[in-house]
Amino acid sequence: MRCKFCDKPAFIKLHYPKMYLCEEHFKEYFERKVKRTIERYKLLRPDERILVVVSGGKDSAVTAYILKKLGYNIECLHINLGIGEYSEKSESYAKKQCEALGVPLHIVRVRELLGKGIGEVKTRRAVCSYCGLTKRYIFNKFAHDNGFNAVATGHNLDDEASFIFANLMNWNTQYLAKQGPLLPGEGKFVKKVKPLYELTEREVVAYALANGIKYMVEECPYARGATTLEYKAILNEMEEKRPGTKINFVKGFLRKKKLFEAELQEVELKECRICGMPAQGKKCSFCNFWGLEKPLEFNGRITPP
Amino acid sequence: MRCKFCDKPAFIKLHYPKMYLCEEHFKEYFERKVKRTIERYKLLRPDERILVVVSGGKDSAVTAYILKKLGYNIECLHINLGIGEYSEKSESYAKKQCEALGVPLHIVRVRELLGKGIGEVKTRRAVCSYCGLTKRYIFNKFAHDNGFNAVATGHNLDDEASFIFANLMNWNTQYLAKQGPLLPGEGKFVKKVKPLYELTEREVVAYALANGIKYMVEECPYARGATTLEYKAILNEMEEKRPGTKINFVKGFLRKKKLFEAELQEVELKECRICGMPAQGKKCSFCNFWGLEKPLEFNGRITPP
């Protein structure tokens, strides 16, 4: 098959809208789509300082790559989770990716910072749950302390669709009200954005391939595995039968999201007495979970590239 | 395998809760579950006159059978849709079912009543859409004209789960607010109840088999086919991996249903100027669709059993 727009052989067959594209026209398509996502949801302004959280995986690598290519002012942050070899390999991928881009990379290592790696804490809480809590706190605090205007993450359409799907299937609707491509900043919460919100995992993989972006393929050994992957498989099955299922499902959700806002509790946020960040009780959930007595300070602790 | 409660060989393996049951104990289980559904959702009172809508298929046949067995005061209504041989066969099954039960059966034939059968009307509206409209109007008007206190339909757990699932996937959330085992009566709307709300299709089939209930197996030739069946297949797939998925999904929905009520428009219902039934405009959607100039009257037109 030939590219829809030129004579070159097709590099990829897109299913929705259905078309064959050569490598160059696919890159163009992908970049235009990211640009449109940024514009449509008003994610970023040209003058903002953006912190891209890079895990070593494909999604965040592509996010950094494309934001840089689109001319945004970015720096990257890698959080080394302290999960043995998996984390060492992830860190080395993140380094290579940022070197290739010529973008400053900051590295925060959970074990150095908190004494224990993810998975080494004795707790009843699920590993993925406190890992998420820890990462979200660290990248927000890091961005806040160092004056970034936005944090960009690599979430793609498949991630978002399966998150919404899982929370609907289990009626955990309280998580849905704040779900979307843009979480506006408020107080000490730095704005969070997802530039790949409308791009499928398959498109992200193809874009990484087309641009020679190397990334960590292995899954985290603690990955929720089963459930999330199951839901992604179901959505892929539906997508195959009805191309456009995922994007229409997610866009439909954004139109109806306000229904779930009725469940948002009006919690008055206080300041955590340890770190001063927003907290529902006396301590924020991060300082509480890790039993901290003094705050993490990232101010000025920027790792040289 | 043996029955969980006695020495007899197992007739069925239930998956959620997981247990093997002999024929007798399965019947007991099924009937207890219907009774509990009726009590939990306050569907019916012992003194009510109930109209069971029987299509000839398994679900409504089982509904009539079990309500009769539980001692309720029931009569049945069959709506012959005028879809060729399919409808003739359906009617004859409905007759046999009611004869076997010794329950009065009323028959309304769409073609006799309205001049055309379902599928013969020239319209842009999908067949299933105006068929649903027509059936709902007829059984409500019939029940209202003849003083019934409730209309019972055969909807089972799979029907309900796939309805909710489909409307979520497509974000047709406006249909969800009024979805449930009980739609209370209001004005000229007779109360609607679904006694099989918590029983799976598989259980209904097994119960029909255990009681020698004969029913129409063929699908309607206009059946939405694809979509609904696809969604049922997906839910069955999830159910197989995680027994209880369907019932937990539907119960979760009932807990959160109030979220969707925000979308209910406060429509002041008027009386249809043709038939006097509730209408949003000058005519109700039934009289409007069928272009009626005088009302259908079912009062006293009860077909002898």
Image: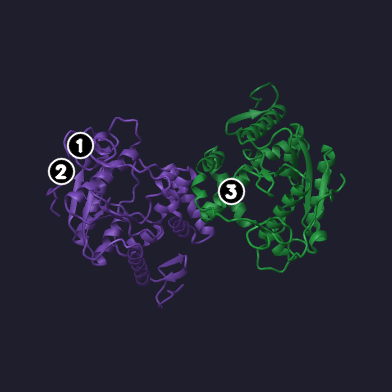
Chain colours: A purple, B green
Q: Which chain contains the residue that carries disc 3?
A: B
Point 48% across, 54% down: residue: A236
Above-or-below relation of A103 to B98: below
Direction from residue B141 to residue A39 in the image, left or right = left
Query: How far across and how far down the image is residue A85, in percent?
Result: 26, 42
Q: Residue B178 carries which label?
A: 3
| Residue carrying label 2 | A297
Q: Residue at x 66, y 25 (%)?
A: B3
**Residue A302 at x, y = what percent?**
14, 50
**Same-chain status of marks 1 and 2:** yes
* Residue A206: x %, y % from top left: 37, 62
B26 and A263: which is toward the camera: A263
Q: Residue A281: x and y, percent?
A: 28, 36
Q: Mark 1 points at which residue?
A: A273
Instruction: Identify which amino acid the numbered label 1 is placed on.
Output: Arg
Tell which tag, 1 or 2, sits nearer the viewer. Answer: 1
Q: In which quarter of the image is the C terminus of chain A?
A: bottom left
- Judged by depth in the image, the label closer to the viewer, 2 or 3, is 3
Location of residue A253 by image quarter: bottom left
SS at mark 3 in the image = loop
Asked whether, in this view, residue B200 is left or right of residue A69, the answer is right
> Amino acid type of disc 2?
Glu
Q: Is residue A208 visible?
A: yes
What is the distance, in whole Å, between disc 3 and disc 1 at their CAs?
47 Å
Residue extending furthest toward the bottom:
A7
Label 1, label 2: how many angstroms apart (C-alpha)?
A: 14 Å
Q: Earlier in the sequence, mark 1 or mark 2?
A: 1
Specify whether disc 2 shares its chain with disc 3.
Answer: no
Residue density around tag 2, few if under 14, some if 14–19, many if 20 or more, within 10 Å = few
